[in-house]
Amino acid sequence: MKFYGYPRADGRVGVRNHLLVAPSVFCAKKVAQQIAENIPGAVYLANPLGCSQVGEDLEQTARTLVNLASHPNVGATLIVGLGCERFTPQEFYDRVKKRGTPVKKIVIQDTGDTLETVRQGTELLCQLHRQMSDQVRKEVPLSSLTLGLECGGTDAASGMAANPSIGVTSDLLIAEGGSSIFSETNEIIGSESILEKRCISPQVSQKLLKAMDEMEKELAIETADPAFHHRQALISTGNFAGGVSTVVEKALGNILKTGKAPIKGVLKFAEIPEENGLFFMDTPSQDAESTTAMVAGGAQIILFTTGRGTPVGFPIAPVIKITGNSQTYQKMRANIDVDTGPVVTKEKTLQQMGQEIFEMVLKVASGQQTKAEILGHDELLGISRVLASCRWQ
Amino acid sequence: MIKALRVSVKDNVAVLLEDIKKGEECNYGGDYPQKANQDIPFGHKIALKDIKTGEDIIKYEHVIGYATQTIKQGDWVHNHNIRSDRGRIKKERPVL
C-alpha cells in the first residue's frame, strides 16, 4: 500500500509542505509571528523557551526545536533569533541545515528593531516560499509513515472504543512496515505487567520499567506535600466525570491504543527512532508536551482520542480527532473527525473501526485536511522542562 | 439489550453503556441482569459482587484500585469508594 507524500533530503517523507517560522527563543515570538502572518499559509512555532536554561534542560529544548524545524512536514524554515539567547540562532541554523531542510535565519539584534526585522524577515520568507513551492507529492510506501498515538480528555468510552480502535489502526500500519509512537509515562502506571511482556528484549523492558518507576517516585513526592493536598489528583476532573476512577484504570484503557505490536524501544523526549515499528517515548502526560515530543520524534500524523472532547491541533502535523463518546461527537462535530461510538453499541467491530481510521490516515497522509487543520487549531506546542533544573531555578 | 460492559469475566465491575436509574436492571452479559442501587451515569461503573473494604477492584482483568468502604452488589463504584495508591505514598490499606 502507498500514499502520496513529499520525499525529503534526509530520506523521510512529509505529509504536508509547511512553510515554517521558528523563533529560537521566546523573545523573538512576536516578530516571528508577524513575519509568518505576512505570507498566507505560513505557520509559526510559539516557542516559550530557549534561554536561561542549562544542561539537559537546554539540550531537550534545542533537540525539540531542531527536530520540529527540520521535520519532514516542513518544506522550509525561517529561524528568527533575538541574538543573546543561550540556544543560539547559529546553532539552530546549523543543525537544521545539516538535516537538509531549506533554511534561512534572521537575528533581531543584528538587524534592528521589530519593524525592520519583520520587513527583512518577510523578504527571506518569500524567497523560501518560492524555493519550496515547486515540491510535489510522489507515491511513497507506507513504511515512511509514523503515527503519534495521543489521548486527551479521556472518559470511560476512550478505553472501550476509541483507544482500542486506533490500536487496530496502529497494528495495520506496523504490519505494512510503518511506525507508531506512544508516550505519557504517568498515564501507563499500573500496566507494567502487560507492557513488559510486549518489549522485544529484556533491555527494552528494563528501560521501560525504569522510566515508569522514576515517574511514579516523582509523582509520589509531589502528591505527598500537605501544602498542596488539594492538588493531588493524578487524573483530571473531566476523567472523573467521565467515569474513570483511578490512574491505573486510565492506564489500562490508554495502552489499548498501542495495539498488539511488539515494543521495539524507549525514546527520550523528542528523540527520533532509528528503525520502524512501535516505540515508547518517555514524556509527561500534558497533551501539548506529549504531542510536541512525538511530532519532533518524527510522527507526521497524530491520532488523538478524546472522550470529553477537545478542539486542539498542532502547527505542522495533522491531528485526527477520535472519540468513543457519540454525545461528544454530536456536540463537537466541527472538531472531531471520527466517532467510534458504534463500537460501544456493537454496530461495528473494533476491526472495522480500526480499518476505517486506517483508510482515513492514508487520505490525510495524501493531503486531506483534518477538522483541526481546517479550523486553524495549533495549540499543541509544548516543550517539557527537565525537572531538576526547574527546581533550582 | 446490553446496558453495561463487563470487559472480562474476572472483573467485579461493569461499565454502563447508558445512564441508568436506581432500581433499574442492566444486562451486562452475565447470567442475570444487575439491578442498580443508585442512579449511575454513562461510562461509570457498577459493582457486580459485594466487595469488602480493602478488596481489589478488577477491570480489564487487572487491579485498578481497592475498596475504601464496603461496596454492595449494584452500587456505583467510583472515587468515593475506591482508590489506588499508585503514584502516591502508600496509605495504610484496610486489612481484609
Image: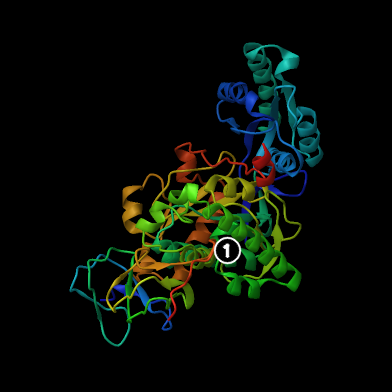
In the image, taking residue A176 as reference, residue A40 lies left or right, namely left
| Residue occupied by mark 1 | A170
In the rendered view, tell whether residue A153 sits above or below residue A262: above
In the rendered view, tell whether residue A326 sits above or below residue A118: below
Q: B61 or A148: nearer the eye?
A: B61
Mark 1 crowdedness (10 Å alpha carbons): few <14, some 14-19, many ≥20? many
Identify the residue at horizontal 31%, vertical 68% (top origin): B17
What's the colour scheme?
Answer: rainbow
Report the residue that reaches farthest toward the left.
B23
x, y percent for residue A133: 66, 32
Marked residue chain, label 1: A
In the image, taking residue A204 as reference, residue A313 lies left or right, namely left
Considering the numbered disc 1 on the image, is that residue within a helix, a strand or a loop?
A: helix
Does residue A366 appear in this view?
no
x, y percent for residue A97: 79, 35
x, y percent for residue A297: 68, 50
Q: Amino acid at mark 1?
A: Ser
In the rendered view, tell whether residue A277 sits above or below residue A131: below
Does residue A368 appear in this view?
yes
x, y percent for residue A111: 73, 14
Q: A139 or A211: nearer the eye?
A: A211
Q: Quadrant of residue A353?
A: bottom left
